[in-house]
Amino acid sequence: MARAVLEALPDAHWMARAPGRVNLIGEHTDYNGFPVLPLALDRAAWIAAAPRTEPIVRIRSVDAARWPEEEIALRDLASRVRRGSWVDYVVAGLRTAPPAHGLELVVGSDVPVAAGLSSSAALVVAALLLAQPARSRVELAELAARAEQYVGTHSGGMDQAISLLARAGHALRIDFRPLRTRAVALPPDLVVLVAPSGVLAEKGGAAQAAYNQRVAECARAAGSLGAPVGGLLADVPGERRAERAASLGEALLARRARFVFEEARRVDEAERCLARGDIEGLGALLDASHAGLRDLYEVSHPVVDALVAELRTCGARGARIVGAGFGGCAVAVARRSDVDAIRARCSRELWTFVPGGPAERFALER
Ligand code: GLA
């Protein structure tokens, strides 16, 4: 992909790369102030840039038929209103420090789109790396999370942080407020499988509204459970929060808060499972996460539910919907020795993520 981008912009002066991610566990916890446990894929967005004398920023894709280009006058870049197009994500990163001169940008990405694998944050991060190359990665991660709000989704900071701070062969435990990370080694016997459901997990439209609605519901639940004004579910004081959440008067808020508290606990448990190489235990946590996302948080999709069930039947130790939800991929964990059998049994395409040093790869395989 890097080559295709450079061929499309032979006089490029700068180039940035930002990977997508698969989240092992800790879904919809980030914007509630709780940790997440994702890993970066070796699929990434690339943006090359070349200076131009005209005061224009031209943004185009290597796949121009699918992703139409846009030209923005330099003086309008910072005030450009979002249009619901792919260019919004590039602008989100660029407008944090608008360039002083014209630019031509060429974008390419092999992160599957609308799959729950963070193709959009990869664009924001790559653009931000071009706009502010001198900043530290932690600063950029904080900045990128705020920058992406421009697109209208009230998302948390997971996708940007893993894209900027991932370490090969490791998952990353990410805590927020302030941003802190801890690399978590993956057991040598673990293989992470990603299976696309074929249902697009769009970031705009109804899915965006449903996501933002969850953010608002959690904020209301936090207030009802005693968090200070403007606080998050992580600010709710006291032990046994999940149990207290279950008794909230408004049943919908009770379901949302219960899921988030339980999912946050699962992140801690998953980290312990990884440390002791307990793939069965990790799988059980993924299964529980999926059940919660489906029944309590209500962000799954029947096609993904069926896919998750199939992955389990085929020999995965646990599986769940990944990312914001409403479609996209399932993530599953398996023992290395079971992967061939799973692939043979499963009716679906399977992407295998095999962590570990130079052999790390994310292969699209059947
Ligand atoms: C999207 C958001 C993230 C996170 C996930 C759900 O990917 O961008 O911040 O909230 O959904 O875990």
Image (cartoon, rainbow, N blue to C red):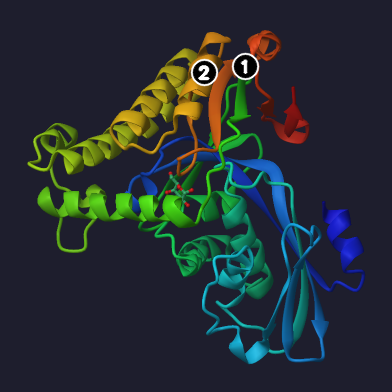
Q: Above or below — where is 299 with respect to 45?
A: above
Q: CA distance from mark 1 to mark 2?
A: 8 Å
Nearer the N terminus, badge 1 or badge 2? 1
Q: Quadrant of residue 351?
A: top right
Quarter holding the C terminus?
top right
Q: Residue at x 79, y 62 (%)?
A: 64
Identify the element where label 1 is drawn: loop
Q: Are marks 1 and 2 in contact (CB under 8 Å)?
A: yes
Graded by Cα atoms within 10 Å as few (under 14), some (14 to 19) or many (20 or more), the crowding at tag 1 reads some
Q: Residues within 10 Å of mark 2 (few under 14, many from 20)?
A: some
The one nearer the camera, 243 or 171, is: 243
The answer to whether residue 317 of the structure is visible from this angle is: no
Mark number, residue 277: 2
Between 343 and 352, the residue placed more toward the observer is 343
| Tag count | 2
Picture quarter containing residue 177? bottom left
Residue 231: quadrant of the picture: bottom left
Three-letter amino acid code at disc 1? Asp
Question: With 48 as the anchor, is 294 left or right in this view?
Answer: left
Residue 243 showing in the rendered view: yes
Q: Position of residue 108 (x, y in %)?
A: 76, 57
The correct choice, above or below, for 152 with respect to 73 in the image is: above
Residue 164 spot, x, y in % from top left: 59, 55
The secondary structure type at the circle numbered 2 is loop
Q: Residue at x 64, y 14 (%)?
A: 346
In the rendering, which numbered label is found on residue 189? 1
Counting from the top left corner in percent of width and height, residue 151 is at 50, 66
